[in-house]
Every structure is written in C-alpha cells, then in structure tokens.
Amino acid sequence: MNFQKIKESDEVELPLLLKNRLVSLVLYIKEKIELGQFDALTLAQIAKDNRMTIPQLMEFGFTKANLVCHAVVVENEVLIQKLIGLDLATMGASLTEQVKAYLFQMYQHDLKQLAFRAAVQAYAWTWSVVDEERVTNQAMKLMTPIYMALHAHGFTHLDARCQAIWALYVRGLRAAALSKGSASDCLAAITPSLEFITESKK
C-alpha cells in the first residue's frame, strides 16, 4: 500500500451508455453470485441474459473475473461511503480500542454479505493489474482512518502497518466464513496479532 498515491476515483473510463449497462450487469452478477449460480455461467449466457453479445462483452474487457471485480468495487464503495470521515479518536481510549472498534464496524457490514465476499475470492486470483489496483486503492481508502490514527499516536512505517492490518482483517473474515462466526469472533481471531501492531512502535 502506498497512501501517497490514493486515487480519488475507482471507476474505469467507459462510454456513458456502457456505464449504464454496467450498472445492470453488476446487479446481475451479484445476484448470481449470492445464489451460487455464477460459477456455472458462461460468457455466452451472461451476454444473452443481459441482451449483449460475447464480442460486446470482450470488447470492453468484460471477462467473468473482470465483472466480479466491478461487483466488488461497487460493494466496497458502499462500505467506504459508510465509514468515510470517521475519527477513530472518538471510538476508544487507546489506539488498540480505536482500531478494534473500526474493524468491528467493517466486519458487521461484510458479514451481512459474507456469501458474496467468500464466493469472489477465487476470481481475485485472475484479475488484471488494473482490476487489482482498483481494489487495492479501495483498501487504502478503508484503511485511511487507521493510517491517520497510527500517525496521531506517533507510529512509523504506516503503510506497512496498514497493509498488515488489512491482511489481518481479511484473515478474520475468512475465519467467520469457515466457522459461521460473528463480528466479535472475527475480531477475536486477529486480536493478538492486531495488538502487536498497534501497541509496539518497534
């Protein structure tokens, strides 16, 4: 993560008509993923269901993995807008309490769509560099309040610490997916490692 290079927009350059089509495509993709039907779909079926042709999908790079990325970006944006501007200083007495409270809110949000979050993981391995950069940019946006809190408490190596906390967050979400856990369970699974990052300045 490089917080000096956060991009304001996570959108891709597309003609207006295609942007409108992408909105309906994303809704379709998310519905199919949540119903467990996406893996079995072919590009031909996706195109047919959305009144498009395979050449039209491929002309704009709409592979299955890319369409999943578009759906992930939309879902991430909902969470970003929900948490944007939060001041962690109001969320606990210590830095550790503040970070835990913030991650707890993220877990509460993501657990409501855990089936979607779990299902998209396999497709992330085949995203393009551009797709990966978009999602990484969103991760940095979500970690920005933590970045600011770490800075306020005099910590160094902020990018590395935020990257480690993000990795822990994803690990906690995976733990919930495997054991059907709660937001508290997610947090408990990563607390020892999280405390090491937020309590030691070395």
Image: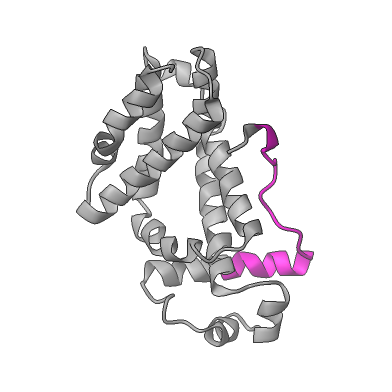
Looking at the image, residue 173 sits to the left or right of residue 17; the answer is left
- The x, y position of residue 167, in whole percent, is 42, 42
- The x, y position of residue 39, in whole percent, is 42, 76
Residue drawn at point x = 34 percent, y = 45 percent:
171
Q: In this view, does 53 lie above or below 63?
A: below
Residue drawn at point x = 46 percent, y = 21 percent:
88
Look at the image and say whether residue 8 sits in the magenta stretch.
yes
The extreme front residue here reads: 202
Q: Where the C terminus falls, by quadrant?
A: top left
Residue drawn at point x = 35 percent, y = 20 percent:
97
Residue 53 can be seen in this image: no
Q: In this view, does 182 lie above or below 125?
A: above
Look at the image and say whether residue 126 sits in the magenta stretch.
no
Residue drawn at point x = 57 percent, y = 51 percent:
135
- The x, y position of residue 62, in whole percent, is 63, 72
Q: Nearer the viewer, residue 111 or 171?
A: 171
Answer with the quarter of the image where residue 178 lies.
bottom left
Looking at the image, residue 147 sits to the left or right of residue 190; the answer is right
**Residue range corresponding to the magenta coloring:** 4-25
